[in-house]
Amino acid sequence: MNALCEAVKNYGPFVGRLLLALIFILSGWGKIGGFEGTVGYIASKGLPLPQVAAVAAIVIELGAGILLILGWQTRWAATALLIFLIPTTLFFHNFWAVEAARQAGEQIHFLKNLAIMGGMLYVMAYGAGPLSLDNRRR
């Protein structure tokens, strides 16, 4: 059991960062390929400057996601993603304001985002861990 715990201490933070970042990288990449659809979806929520918001989302998701995987400026990357998730969760997964047929799905996405926020808070508090560029600089 001790060997397993030591392996988790060494490799767990990297795998955790990878898993947290994956959703953002895939989402950001998807927004590039479906840029007009992304802009339309943002506009449908009544948000201003949907093109600018779409570009900002791509930059944040890809940029901070890659930084998170690399473990470089990890606390800043996690902070950016946490801040990004707050309005994203409230505006795009507002399960309390959608028709009954969509409530369960939106609530799942809302709770998923809360869980990711928890992961980002953990990274902000404890840093990148041993397998990271942040750790190599020390």
Image (cartoon, helix red, strand yellow):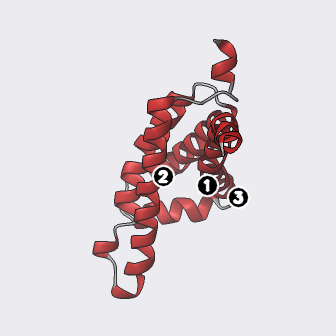
Residue drawn at x 42%, y 67% is 44
Marks 2,3: beta carbons within 8 A:
no
Q: In this figure, which residue is indicated by the disc labeled 2?
A: 116
Q: Position of residue 119 (x, y in %)?
A: 48, 46
What amino acid type is highlighted by mark number 1? Answer: Ile
Marks 1,2: beta carbons within 8 A:
yes
Compared with 134, 115 (above or below) is: below
In the foreground, 101 or 72 = 72
Q: Position of residue 106 (x, y in %)?
A: 42, 72
Compared with 20, 133 (above or below) is: above
Q: In this figure, which residue is indicated by the disc labeled 3?
A: 33
Q: Mark 2 packing: few (<14 Cα in 10 Å), some, or many (20+)?
A: some
Residue drawn at x 41%, y 81% is 102
Q: Mark 1 packing: few (<14 Cα in 10 Å), some, or many (20+)?
A: some
What amino acid type is highlighted by mark number 2? Answer: Ile
Assign a secondary structure to mark 1: helix
Q: In this figure, which residue is indicated by the disc labeled 1?
A: 23
Q: Does the rendering let one see residue 48?
A: no
Assign a secondary structure to mark 2: helix
Assign a secondary structure to mark 3: helix
